[in-house]
Image (cartoon, rainbow, N blue to C red):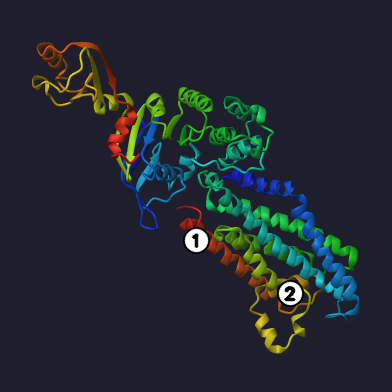
Amino acid sequence: MSSIISIQGLSKTYEGGFTALRSVDLDIQQGEIFALLGPNGAGKTTLIGIVCGLVVPTGGSVTVAGHDIQTEFRRTRSRIGLVPQEITIDMFTRVIDAVRYSRGLFGKAPDEAYLEQVLRDLSLWDKRNEQMRALSGGMKRRVMIAKALAHDPDILFLDEPTAGVDVELRQSMWQVIGKLRERGVTIILTTHYIEEAEQMADRVGVINQGEIVVVEETGALMNKMGQKHLTLQLAEPLDAIPQALRVDGLALSEDGTALTFDYDTQADRTGITTLLASLNDAGVSVRDLETKQSSLEEIFVGLVGGQA
Amino acid sequence: MNFRAIWTIYHAEMARTGRTLLQSVLAPVISTSLYFIVFGAAIGSRIDQIDGVGYGAFIVPGLVMMMILMQSVSNAAIGIYFPKFTGTVYEILSAPISAFEIVIGYVGAAATKSLILGALVLGTAAFFVPLEIQHPLAMLAFLVLTSLTFSLFGFIVGIWADNFEQLNIVPMLIVTPLTFLGGSFYSISVLPPFWQTVTLFNPVVYLISGFRWSFYGVSDVDVGISLLAILGFFLLCLGIVWWMFRTGYRMKT
């Protein structure tokens, strides 16, 4: 895949002196779903704002499909759709007029058939003649997505698209995002629901205090940075871990009925075979065992130092 | 040029007026008509002619200009302030539109609205007082230039305003007093010499004087100076708007 957005040395310091971005380098691949994760104030929205033209950077450069976002803003912005974090719509406008307005702003000729398809995909077609103020919160958020898609962009920024949305609507939104990906739309999203990023994103980037901490394919990140936990349910409780079994990563539960062992899946030797042999030698019987991989959320919390 | 985007902004602004027809059109026309009834018909019948023009007819250009000034400023100010207030301005700023195109859309719509209202007031005035227009082309030029200039000024106010109080303070505390003291209801020649000089620092004097000349061929200041004054103010407003967009003043962070 080729890079569709290229960010080089991007910096932003606001007038009050707060530095939101510190020389960020990032490449977004064409057609991927990229999840940008980070605690509040990490710089996610500033980064999106700069690419979309809402925030003026203090340093660095951004190109979209090879075009500079400042000197060739018409070419770059016409390819981008933005769904901001807040629901910001004219409450007295009808749904259909709002999406027509968005399409017109981007200089696209009217295309009622396309707008109908967008509204149908988002289950908004029946509401097309309703004023925004008559819609529920979830519907309004869908309208925000419809407006961002009205000019048929091939890059879509979604800033916290599922914040405050109920489970059913969240799932239907992810279905829509899945369809967009099938159409080849590049999607960059921020979310606090990290399990969603784990399920949907091709790649994950973690930003903290204005710096990109890690960018990795979701699966590779989990393999590389994730740990596995082995839990051994003991046939007889122990008072303490026998001297012969004391190795790094092994712990006894408070009630003495289980041993837990953290191990690195990428290490040459995980230590599991040795541990099981040692247990046998020490005469400790195991009733049951299970393994569990650390979630993306646990990896994320580890990366940002508990600030999430 | 993104003509479709300009049309989209223009059309949306005009549609907003359509949604609030009573407030946007009927209210200003009625309130200005009251001036004709009170000052033109009732009190005006007891006032002598000014510069050979009956008082009722004399105040018509001033009242039309007052309507144009007030409506241009408030329409353009609300037009850009409302998206800022609701946050929908993000869509305009992230669209492939230049600052110039945004200004044409908003200022064009505000100027169109105020011109329509000015025409309505002029038409209403014809019911109350005899009107003559000696220089119709000059009248049109003054109307268009004034509505564009003050719509630009309103646009600046809308970008500058951080709250509704600031949004209203400029029309109420600056534009209205300047219009009343700019010769809407009198010729500045009736003032003592000192106040005549002071009045010349009021830019609205030049607008009303020039506009009145286009009706009756009489003016307080030379019509050429009036045109230069309005052109100067137009260029000044254009420069301020250009600077605002270049720096992202109160629009971008």
Residue B217 place in picture, x, y as percent: 80, 75
How many other residues sit within 10 Å of disc 1, few (<14), some (14-19) or many (≥20)? few
Residue B32 place in picture, x, y as percent: 80, 64
Q: Which of B252 and B50 is in front in this view?
A: B252
Give the image quarter of residue A225.
top left
Of marks 1 and 2, which one's residue comes earlier in the chain?
A: 2
Determine the chain carrying the residue at label 2.
B
Determine the chain carrying the residue at label 1.
B
Q: Is mark 1 on a helix, strand or loop?
A: helix
Residue B197 place in picture, x, y as percent: 66, 85
Residue A304 place in picture, x, y as percent: 30, 39
Residue at 76 percent across and 73 percent down: it is B184
Q: Name the residue under label 2.
A: B209
Q: Which of B102 and B36 is in front in this view?
A: B36
In the rendered image, the vertical position of residue B75 relative to residue B133, given as above or below: above
Q: Nearer the viewer, residue A64 or A226?
A: A226
Amino acid on which the number 2 mark rests in the picture? Ser
Q: Mark 1 points at which residue?
A: B243
Q: What element carries label 2?
A: helix
